Image: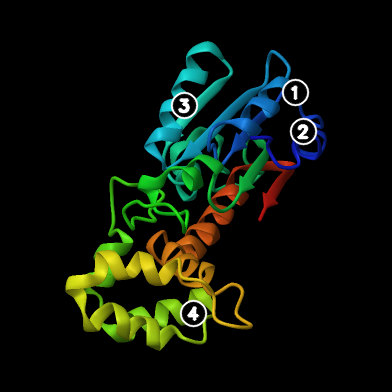
Amino acid sequence: HTPAMLPEIVARLVQPSPDGVVVDATYGRGGHTRGMIAALSARGVCHAFDMDAEAVTDGKALAAEERRFTIHHAPFSRMAATLPHLAETPSGGGGGVAAILFDLGISSPQFDEAHRGFRPEADGPLDLRFDQSRGQTAHEFLSTAPRAEITRVLRSFGETAVSETLARSFRDAPETLPRRSRCVLAAPPPPRQPHFAAAPRQALRVHLNDEFGECSRGLEAARSLLSPGGRIGVIT
């Protein structure tokens, strides 16, 4: 997998401050991280964050061979709490981080691994969590949430016109949910609705991982870490 926009990221985020501290807020499998580290000087430092245990395992292997790098098993919303020595003090003056990168959404390994549930055609559990150690799976949510709540999630985050119909299909026959949920979420789209299959799966993923809330908190945490003239890059 080739990291998206790596030359631009290096040029705009790392090269202006090669001796500084940079943060990859979404490690994944380290494609961007490795490129950022390569552009740092011997005095530069890179920190990375990820909620995914498999990503952190990969990051620890990189950290074992690269002294300038540290991986943190935490959501990026906690980067300021994890790096308090780099955060802005109450007296102001800015933080100690030169650049921070966010690459939002699903990583390629997460999408490819059937047991994560992100790939519509994959025959795996309906999970959809970035951090599999906590929170409800998609199957648990669909099995227990009131129909009105499922409808709200599908409508708010998936923009699907058939959210109420889908919610009813999940809740009216819970004993068939494991089969029907995969069937419905991966079904061929109705006419003139090419994104039908993707929309409800996306809605569930956004809700279960609190993606909008996490982004808001993450950007605020990043702001508190940036040094004067520091830069934030966001890939969506």
Q: CA distance from mark 4 to mark 2?
A: 36 Å
Task: Please tell me whether mark 3 sits on a helix, a strand or a loop.
Answer: helix
Residue 81 at x, y percent in the picture = 44, 43
Q: CA distance from mark 4 to mark 1?
A: 41 Å
Q: From the viewer's perspective, is the residue at label 4 or at label 1 nearer?
A: 4
Nearer to us in this view, 230 or 195? 195
| Label 4 Cα neighbours within 10 Å, binned few <14 / some 14-19 / many ≥20 | some
Give the labeled residue for mark 1: 39
Q: Amino acid at mark 3?
A: Asp
Residue 84 at x, y percent in the picture = 48, 37
Give the labeled residue for mark 3: 58
Task: Please tell me whether mark 1 sits on a helix, a strand or a loop.
Answer: helix
Which numbered disc flags the more N-terminal residue, 4 or 1?
1
Give the labeled residue for mark 2: 10
| Residue at far left of view | 175
Q: Are marks 4 and 1 in contact (CB under 8 Å)?
A: no
Give the labeled residue for mark 4: 156
Q: CA distance from mark 1 to mark 2?
A: 7 Å
Q: Amino acid at mark 4?
A: Ser
Q: Residue at 60% across / 27% down in the picture?
A: 46
Nearer to us in this view, 176 or 56? 176
Nearer to us in this view, 16 or 157? 157
Q: CA distance from mark 3 to mark 1?
A: 20 Å
Q: Amino acid at mark 2?
A: Val
**Figure quadrant of residue 23:** top right
**Figure quadrant of residue 133:** top left
